[in-house]
Amino acid sequence: MGQKEGMKALKGKTVILGITGGIAAYKGAELCRLLIQEGATVQVVMTQAAQQFITPLTFSTITGQETLTETFASDSQPLKHIELANKADLFLVAPATANIIAKFAMGLADDLLSTTALVINCPALVAPAMNVNMYAKTVVQENLSILKRRGWKIIEPEEGFLACGTSGKGRLANLESIVAACRQALLPSDFEGQKVLVTAGGTREPLDPVRYIGNYSSGKMGYALAQAAKERGAEVTLISTSELPPPPEIDIVRVQTAAEMLAAIQERFSECDIVIKAAAVADFRPGNMAEQKIKKGDHKELNLSLEPTPDILANLSKVKEKQLLIGFAAETQDLLQNAKKKLDEKNLDLIVANDVNRKDAGFGSETNVVTLLYPDGHKEQVPKMPKLEVAHRILDAIRTLPGFKERN
Ligand code: CTP
């Protein structure tokens, strides 16, 4: 995949989605919808057992493609499995039963799905879903290990309440994680081996035990960056003040204040290769936090005395060695001049200038519009797009920096 395509990994791709016979088969319908929303063409192949749980018509209706169930459906197309495999960019089986996993592992080919699996030449993923005891069985685990060794990606099931009335590991992974794994399988692994630290959200500086000074940052841009770096193979730590749930498979460290954020970064800084500071850090905090809730009746008027917080990026730039430092400039006026000043003063490798006045950009919004400023003076405008795509554009830019070292 080339750069500057916004990294819409699934756009224009053909996904063969295998549905096998477990109760989670019904979730396949929603999974189809999510994949289509990402721009994929989804071709569903169902096993006989899957059709006991959900009908082919459901999938044909969602995908706009005839759902395939038979190897020899018509005399005119006896080589359906070859045709299917040739057009596939991605082969995904969700939910995958113990039976289909065993067939894949052994190379058995007795229906359209297992036959197609023997012909494909594209990334293959399975998302197992079954009873907890069945999933734990040595034979199932060994079959999964065989697939892993052959380069298949296993999307681990979750722990939780199962249809059989028990609880444990065996529930189909959540659909967002499955889509993320699909995206990851199609994206280049150009950040593999990189340790990336991302900060997200607005800091909260306490006034008293129940109040704080904060800002409107939601953390969405930082989360998108963490997810994008993970999708491209990085080892990501997200240091966040946001209460959003972390993206799949990302280590999250929750902090509140600028001082806590600084400490969390310092602890990890020597190990990491890239720091992306998407967080909106408070510049001032109350000089003294009141020990008890401030009572309205005790004051006619209330003057707050504020003291500066540490400037995290400025601190890091003084001690940095190999690390690349990427900052954000959240501005309401003179966007590029202010951003350039921060780039120089904080000795950054790249700054992302973000006009936070716009409704479709900056704090809380699902999309962003940014300009990337480089130390050599050149700049690059990134038009309005979803934050995850902006994140991929920022990663594309980081790859071009002189200090970026390939690690795979
Ligand atoms: N930043 C930081 N520590 C601070 C303040 C900001 O590390 N105490 C980082 C932010 O995470 C961001 C960059 O510095 O990556 C610029 O933050 P911004 O709030 O736009 O600018 P400030 O440097 O705080 O300057 P000003 O508030 O005057 O615009």
Image (cartoon, grey):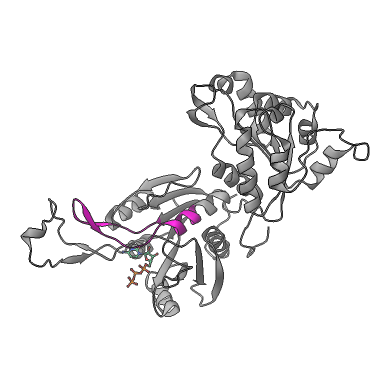
Residue 11 place in picture, x, y as percent: 67, 56
Extreme right residue here?
75
Instruction: Work out whether 77 lies above or below 48.
Output: below
Location of the N terminus by quadrant is bottom right
Taking 359 as reference, is 175 above or below it?
Answer: above
Pinpoint residue 275: horizontal percent, then vertical percent. Answer: 44, 57
Magenta residues span 200-226
Figure label count: 0
The residue depicted at 53 percent of the width and 63 percent of the height is 394
Image quadrant of residue 142?
Answer: top right
Q: Give the residue drawn at x 42%, y 74%.
A: 339
Q: Is residue 71 left or right of residue 261?
A: right
Judge from the rendering whether residue 140 lies leftward or rightward of residue 205; answer left or right.
right
Given residues 89 and 317, the one toward you in this image is 89
| Residue 177 position in % (x across, y down) | 55, 43
Q: Is residue 214 magenta?
A: yes
Q: Which quarter is ligand 1 in?
A: bottom left
Locate residue 93: give its quadrant.
top right
Q: Residue at the location (61% across, 29% down)?
A: 23
Looking at the image, residue 248 sits to the left or right of residue 188; the answer is: left
Q: At which x and y percent is residue 252?
A: 41, 46
**Can residue 271 be seen by looking at this rendering?**
no
Of 340 and 349, the residue lying toward us: 340
Q: Decide if residue 301 is on the left or right side of residue 380.
A: left
**Residue lying at 54% horizontally and 57% vertically, measured from the top left:** 388
Can residue 387 be seen from the camera position used here? yes
